[in-house]
Image (spheres, rainbow, N blue to C red):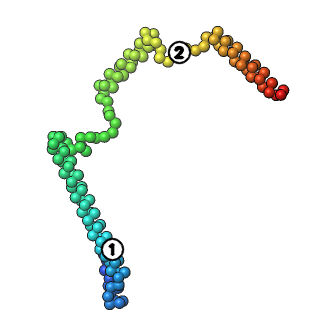
Amino acid sequence: MKRATWSRRMSTQAISKSGEFSSHHIALIAKLNLMDTSVKALQEAIVIRRRIDTLEKRLSSILRGSLPAAAAHRGGRHRVSAATRAKLASAARARWARIKAGKERNPFKKKGGLTPAGRKRLSQLMKARWAARRRGSARTRSR
């Protein structure tokens, strides 16, 4: 609306000053009228697109024989029923009872590890490696 008012005001000013339109004013008025027309066309296209979308949703719901897609799918996370949650909890309690009773191996028990003999052997190997490194660095210093 403001553009149309402005273009009318500009056109009357252009006529009042010189008695006729200048080429600049004619081009400006044409651009403003084109912009008004294109905005109206875009608004109409948006309205039509919304109508098409609602009609497509209605058609798909009729063909499926159920509620529209937006109403059928609530979104969010998948929820587990109370009965299923109770079954899972009882199974977990039974599993922990078996573990604590010693019928199953404790899943958190540390596996493997070094024996005292293995620890002593590794200690000797590391001491020999350090001694060799010290001997090697002493040779490079003496050179």
- Counting labels gives 2
- Give the percent coordinates (x, y) of residue 63: 15, 42
Circle 2 SS class: loop
Which residue is painted at 31% across and 76% down in the image? Answer: 30
* Picture quadrant where residue 134 is located: top right
- Give the percent coordinates (x, y) of residue 33: 29, 74
Q: Is residue 57 left or right of residue 133?
A: left
Residue closest to the eye, 140 or 93: 140
Which residue is painted at 37% across and 81% down in the image? Answer: 24
Residue closest to the eye, 21 or 81: 21
Q: Nearer the viewer, mark 1 or mark 2?
A: 1
Which residue is painted at 67% across and 12% down in the image? Answer: 120
- Mark seen at residue 31: 1
Residue designated by label 2: 111
Disc 1 marks a residue whose amino acid type is Lys
Please rate how many residues cluster around mark 2, counting C-alpha atoms within 10 Å: few if below 14, some from 14 to 19, many from 20: few
- Give the percent coordinates (x, y) of residue 142: 84, 26
Which residue is painted at 47% across and 14% down in the image? Answer: 106
Circle 1 SS class: helix
Pick whichever of labels 1 and 2 is earlier in the sequence. Answer: 1
Observer able to see residue 101? no
Mark 1 → mark 2, Cα distance in angstroms: 81 Å
Disc 2 marks a residue whose amino acid type is Lys
